[in-house]
């Protein structure tokens, strides 16, 4: 079994259709109307023991595509732990798949009730599903996806009960191969929060620095004006996880943002 935690600004399309996917807005540069939103790199996080091999944009400089980071965090006994984790950044728009094809069909569990709806005040916000400005377009073919709360933000947990062997994550013509014992990875576009002095935002609709406005990238008119920023989710079960990246995020007390949340149709 493989669990993929999908953390950050991602739009899940296909609540009531057979074809399902997730769109991560292109955060490699800030939107013109929201220049103070920091970069949001879409990355796949794999603990060092869970990686078998990778062929990941080998022609690019290493710092643009891959980092091996020592992440320190406190455990439940308030003791410091350290884990080495690979960050594989997606440096250009890519079609992404995870090893879920043997677990078809995919199921979104109550997404329309648990995830905030991507909408504006006039209720006419339209996602460009044909040609979105997305850094990653993730095809979701199998597995069960549910919504949980992580640091007061809605986060999606994707459980693939029967992953393909070998377990490969593909982005365009590139790939990451997981070791057989791997059972938990993270796909996120909030890795910049680990290093920047980011204090977070609440659901203030008038705050132009709220990261939620990055969703303007996937709007048909590329306009985020009037987007309704969700407040903290209610009535969700807490996310259970063991991955070092999420432990590190959880350990950073200053991170608490209703805007860095998944959304759906």
Image (tube, helix red, strand yellow):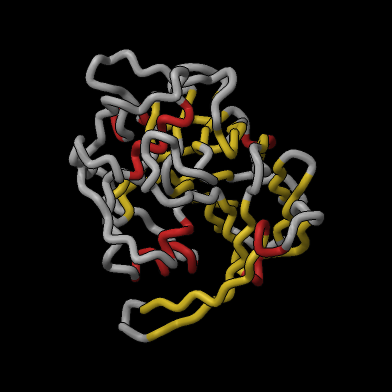
Marker count (numbered): 0
Residue 113 placement (x, y as % from top left): 29, 29
Residue 259 placement (x, y as % from top left): 30, 43
Residue 19 placement (x, y as % from top left): 57, 21
Q: Residue 39 versus residue 184: which sits nearer the camera?
A: 39
Q: Residue 232 versus residue 61: which sits nearer the camera?
A: 61
Residue at (30% x, 26% y) in the render: 225
Q: Can residue 216 be seen in this view?
A: yes
User: Which quarter shows the C terminus?
Assistant: top left
Residue at (72% x, 54% y) in the render: 176
Residue at (49% x, 74% y) in the render: 71
Q: In this view, does 96 lie above or below 53?
A: above
Residue 121 placement (x, y as % from top left): 22, 20
Residue at (41% x, 30% y) in the render: 216
Hey, which quadrant is residue 61 in on the image? bottom right
Q: Is residue 79 above or below residue 13?
A: below
Q: Is residue 69 above or below residue 131?
A: below
**Name of the residue lying farthest toward the bottom:** 79
Q: Is residue 239 above or below residue 102?
A: below
Q: Residue 28 versus residue 5: which sits nearer the camera?
A: 28
Instruction: Please state if 205 lies on the left or on the right of 134 as rendered.
Output: left
Instruction: Please state if 212 lies on the left or on the right of 159 as rendered.
Output: left
Hey, which quadrant is residue 232 in on the image? top left
Q: Residue 198 versus residue 95: which sits nearer the camera?
A: 198
């Amino acid at each position: 079994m493989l669990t993929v935690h999908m953390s950050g600004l991602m739009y899940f399309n296909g609540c009531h259709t057979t074809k399902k996917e997730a769109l991560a807005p292109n955060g490699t540069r800030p939107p013109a109307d929201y220049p103070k939103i920091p970069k949001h790199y879409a990355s796949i996080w794999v603990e060092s023991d869970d990686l078998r091999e990778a062929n990941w944009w080998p022609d690019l400089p290493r710092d643009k595509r891959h980092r091996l980071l020592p992440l320190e965090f406190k455990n439940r006994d308030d003791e410091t732990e350290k884990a080495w984790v690979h960050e594989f950044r997606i440096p250009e728009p890519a079609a992404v798949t995870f090893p879920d094809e043997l677990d078809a069909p995919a199921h979104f569990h109550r997404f329309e009730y648990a995830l905030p709806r991507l909408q504006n005040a006039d209720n006419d916000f339209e996602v460009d599903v044909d040609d979105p400005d997305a850094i990653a377009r993730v095809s979701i073919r199998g597995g069960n996806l549910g919504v949980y709360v992580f640091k007061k933000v809605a986060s999606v947990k994707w459980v693939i009960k029967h992953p393909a062997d070998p377990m490969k994550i593909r982005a365009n013509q590139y790939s990451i191969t997981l070791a057989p014992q791997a059972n938990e990875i993270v796909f996120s576009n909030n890795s910049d929060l680990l290093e920047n002095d980011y204090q977070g935002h609440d659901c203030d609709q008038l705050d132009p620095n709220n990261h939620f406005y990055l969703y303007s990238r996937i709007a048909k008119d590329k306009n985020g004006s009037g987007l309704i920023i969700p407040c903290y989710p209610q009535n969700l079960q807490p996310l259970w996880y063991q991955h070092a990246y999420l432990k590190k995020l959880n350990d950073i007390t200053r991170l608490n943002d209703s805007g860095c949340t998944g959304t759906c149709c």
